[in-house]
Image (cartoon, rainbow, N blue to C red):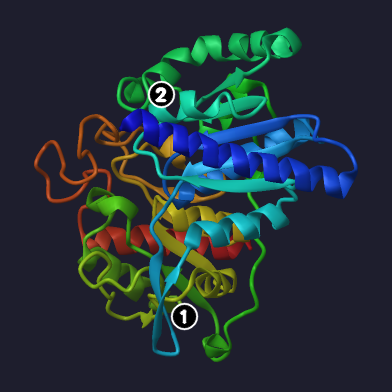
Amino acid sequence: MRATWFRRQAAAIRKVVKEKVGAYRAEYGVRPGLVIGILKLGGHGDLLQQLVFAKAVRKRWRRALIVVFSRALAPTRAVVGGEVFDDHVDATLFANAAEAMRLGPIVHVPLALAGWRAAVPLLRGLVDCLWDVQYVAASYWRDLKRHGREQLEFDSRLKYYSRFYSGFPCLSNPELHCLRMTQFELLAESTGLDVCEDDLRLAAPDADAALADAGDYATLHNGAGGGAVLKTLPLAHMEAVAAALARQGLAVVQIGKRDDAKEPPILGTRDLRGLPMMASMAVMARAKLHVGIEGGPIYVAKGLGVPRAVFIGPTSPHVFGFADSVNLVRCGADGEPVCEPCWWSRSRWDRRCPKGLPYCANFPQSPEEAAEAVGNASRVMRHAS
């Protein structure tokens, strides 16, 4: 049964790739030099990181057709004019970034797969080269007679970091954190490709007319995909943050899902939860500051060029922090988080603290501390701008 399902998946993907190769030939008059697949399964932030890697691939192979394999994400419910509809956020982000980052020719193939280990053998025979992108990346070249030199080149780059690839996601995170490298630096070092976080670009949609009277404002977000409640701050902390921003003369706009159980309304904000992704991006693009937790909307703010202050708890600020963000983490005298980041240290790592704490020890431990941290960050970033 499972083998039959895999064969059907492979046949469907092969058909898509063949159609895109035909479209490439029709447009450019030649077959693409290579068909390069890029695999990464995760949420919206993972997809945008994957597209930064696609940009590095494009720099190296300018005539390639790039096929982005990602997880098929469930649509988000959005509301427009009182009407509820399904908003395919991943498709919106892909289309926007592909144009803004000049990634084409490129195609997006969402996969209904349970895990990356099953996806690699399924996909590696369907493209000339498959890049499996985790914290580091491995390449699989189909024709070693033609591309044996490339396989050796990239295997030698990965050799030092191979334990992070083979141990993904659970076996090597403490050591990965101690390298003090961002995910983009890890990808660059493990592949030799020009992977650069500043390549992440999104085109800002037209501003929402409803915010024409808002003046200067900050956006606020406190939701995590996949039920990762350990990555979110207590509601009282976020309400104190909103009050601190208001004292600095900023209106505060809450964005995210309209789901009172997972992303409850934050007192003192203008509630714009539940907007379609394009509308949320229009709101974010005009903001003087975005404040949120480590996750997908931070990547969106980065792509839009919006200053951002980011609360990082159970994940590593070294790996997941952007160089130009203000990363808000409680640290000890050595500059390291007071509690070693525990992401992917066990199953359901993002649902409950292993030490039994009500929320992550790397977050501010009171609403007042959260407000002070964001207030300081806001003053610094607004002065710099």
- Please identify the quarter of the rendering in which residue 24 is found: top right
Image quadrant of residue 114?
A: top left
Q: Is residue 52 visible?
A: no
Residue position marked by numbered label 2 in the rendering: 176
Specify which label sits upstream in the sequence, 1 or 2: 2
Element type where label 2 sits in the image:
helix
In the image, taking residue 84 as reference, residue 162 lies left or right, namely: right
Pinpoint residue 355: horizontal percent, then vertical percent: 11, 37
Instruction: Determine the residue positioned at 15% across, 44% down.
Output: 352
Q: Which quadrant of the rendered structure holds the N terminus? A: top left
In this rendered view, identify the residue nearer to me: 369 or 60.
Answer: 60
- Rendering coords of residue 254 (x, y %): 39, 74
Residue 58 in view in this figure = yes
Instruction: Choose between 370 and 232: the one closer to the eye.
Output: 232
- The residue at which mark 1 appears reads as 249
Question: Is 369 in front, or is 58?
Answer: 58
Q: Quadrant of residue 356?
A: top left
Tell me which residue sits at (27%, 44%) in the image.
362
How many marks on residues?
A: 2
Badge 1 density bin: few <14, some 14–19, many ≥20, Cα 10 Å: few
Q: Residue furthest right?
A: 29
As drawn, the label of residue 231 is: none
Q: Residue at x 41, y 44 (%)?
A: 112
**Cα separation between marks 1 and 2:** 40 Å
Disc 1 on helix, strand or loop?
Answer: loop
Q: Which residue is pictured at 88% across the width and 37% down the height?
A: 30
Kind of residue at badge 1: Gly
